[in-house]
């Protein structure tokens, strides 16, 4: 059973545009929601994270929006650049501090 | 800070042999390390969690006798794939966490590409 659902599976955005990736979860015990960026052949790297008591967090061009009542959160990448082309995973932390990953979104930013 | 390394980055082995993958936390002590497996274009699947000095906890469906995990020190965990078969070919990623507190992040290694021929 997929604990964290992520969409879309793939996304193509023009340079300078906004990339939006969405995730949803069911388990209200999740207490921490990170986003990871992964380039081919590399391990995931933490991009930005949020706790459920905050509705929005912004770091540079990256923003997480969190809707606790809807159990949804999303990643917005402003002014998307070709260098942002990667696979993005949302995750949620649950019992035993384990991370449950979404299925990933392959982002392609075209010049 | 918070750098995790893996060795080797790539390994090719013959079916039936065993392969050891190392995961090291370079600049912090990791009380907990995690091992993940990732198939092409798929998400990370947690295989096991290991705490320093104790036996690893394996996720459902992961064979503990096939995937041997040792977390002998606060900076090193090893995953040994025993009697490897082609279906074990995958990208193996470890992560490390500093402490047991809820605020401590997992830091991921660069991954090891295993190919079993």
Image: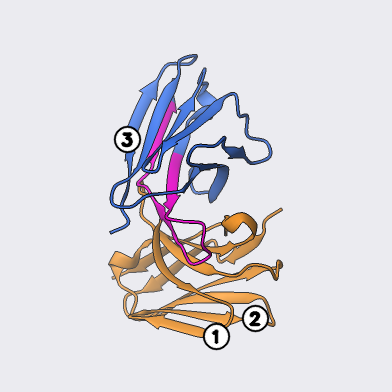
The answer to whether marks 3 and 1 mark residues whose Cβ atoms lie closer than 8 Å is no
Q: Determine crowd level at label 3: few under 14, some 14-19, many 20+ residues with C-alpha closer than 10 A.
A: some
Hue used for the chain lettered A: orange
As drawn, the label of residue B7 is 3
Q: In terms of sequence position, does the residue under pointer 1 or pointer 2 come before the other? A: 1
As drawn, the label of residue B63 is none
The answer to whether marks 1 and 2 mark residues whose Cβ atoms lie closer than 8 Å is yes
Indicate left or right for A2 with A12 as reference.
right
- Does the magenta segment cover residue A67? no
The region drawn magenta spans B92-115
Residue B116 spot, x, y in % from top left: 45, 23
Residue B81 spot, x, y in % from top left: 49, 25
Q: Residue at x 66, y 68 (%)?
A: A25
Query: Which of the chains bears the disc numbered 2?
Result: A
Query: Which of the chains bears the disc numbered 1?
Result: A
Chain in blue (letter): B
Spatial CA span between label 3 and label 1: 39 Å
Quarter where residue A71 is shown:
bottom right
Quarter where residue A2 is shown:
bottom right
Q: Determine crowd level at label 1: few under 14, some 14-19, many 20+ residues with C-alpha closer than 10 A.
A: few
Spatial CA span between label 2 and label 3: 40 Å
Query: Which of the chains bears the disc numbered 3?
Result: B
Q: Tell me the quadrant of the picture where the C terminus of chain A can be found.
A: bottom left
Q: Residue at x 52, y 21 (%)?
A: B85
Question: Which residue corresponds to mark 2?
Answer: A68
Question: Which residue corresponds to mark 1?
Answer: A55
Spatial CA span between label 1 and label 2: 8 Å
């Amino acid at each position: 059973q997929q604990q964290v659902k992520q969409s879309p599976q793939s996304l193509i955005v023009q340079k300078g545009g906004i990339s939006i990736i969405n995730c949803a979860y069911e388990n209200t015990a999740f207490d921490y929601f990170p986003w990871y960026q992964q380039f081919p052949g590399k391990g995931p790297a933490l991009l930005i994270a949020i706790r459920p008591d905050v509705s929005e967090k912004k770091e540079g061009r990256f923003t997480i929006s969190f809707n606790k009542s809807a159990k949804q959160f999303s990643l917005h990448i402003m002014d998307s650049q070709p260098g942002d082309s990667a696979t993005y995973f949302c995750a949620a932390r649950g019992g035993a501090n384990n991370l449950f990953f979404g299925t990933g979104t392959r982002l392609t930013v075209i010049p | 800070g918070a750098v995790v390394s893996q060795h080797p980055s790539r390994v090719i082995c013959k079916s039936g042999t065993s392969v050891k993958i190392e995961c090291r936390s370079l600049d912090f002590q990791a009380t907990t390390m995690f091992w993940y497996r990732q198939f092409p274009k798929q998400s990370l699947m947690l295989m096991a969690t290991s705490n320093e000095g104790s036996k690893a906890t394996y996720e459902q469906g992961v064979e503990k006798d096939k995937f041997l995990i040792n977390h002998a020190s606060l900076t090193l965990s090893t995953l040994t794939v025993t009697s490897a078969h082609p279906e074990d070919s995958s990208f193996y990623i470890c992560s490390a966490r500093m402490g047991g507190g809820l605020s401590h992040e997992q830091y991921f290694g660069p991954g090891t590409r295993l190919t079993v021929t």
